[in-house]
Image (cartoon, grey):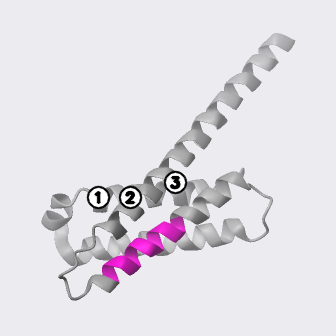
Amino acid sequence: MCAHRYGNLRRKDRDTTAVKLFDCLAAGILFVLSIVDCLLVPRTYTGRIWILGTGLALLFTAMLNVLRIRNSGGVKGLKLFCITANVTMLVFVIALIASIGKVRTLQHWQIPLVGALLLAETVFSLGKGN
């Protein structure tokens, strides 16, 4: 009976580890994509400061998520800041998709990818263990 109980705990730990790994992976990919986005801002485009600002906002959101993962429960208010940043950027991506349309969104694969990563990070931020 004890072995059965410990077996369930091991499986639960494995599930928690997998979720935490996916959380780290999503935050890391978001971090790298935001840096690449900042580096690839066209120099000749007149509105380049807005593109750079969006990349920086994504970078700060990714950094908040990395802090949340590393300091789960240790920093007061960090979870709320992560939820706010994730939801705000997710709404921004949804508004971007709505404004440019389905065809242009599908031509730029990074937009749905960033949206999916932000949705995942929002769900992870809302979780109990974070």
Q: Residue at x 51, y 54 (%)?
A: 27
Tell me: 111 left or right of 92: left
Label 1 to label 2: alpha-carbon separation: 8 Å
Specify whether 109 is left or right of 89: left
- What's the magenta region? 50-61
Q: Quadrant of the N terminus?
A: top right
Residue 33 is tagged as 2
- Residue 37 lies in quadrant: bottom left
Q: Label 3 vs label 1: CA separation?
A: 15 Å
Q: Residue at x 58, y 73 (%)?
A: 84
Element type where label 3 sits in the image: helix
- State whether residue 37 is above or below residue 23: below
129 horizontally vs 124: left or right: right
Answer yes or no: is residue 93 visible: yes
Instruction: Give the residue at x 53% y 57%.
Output: 121
Q: Is residue 39 above or below residue 72?
A: below
Q: Residues within 10 Å of mark 2 (few under 14, many from 20)?
A: some
Amino acid type of disc 2?
Answer: Leu
User: What residue sits right under mark 3 in the picture?
Assistant: 27
Nearer the observer, 87 or 69: 69
Magenta span dominant secondary structure: helix
The furthest residue to the front: 43
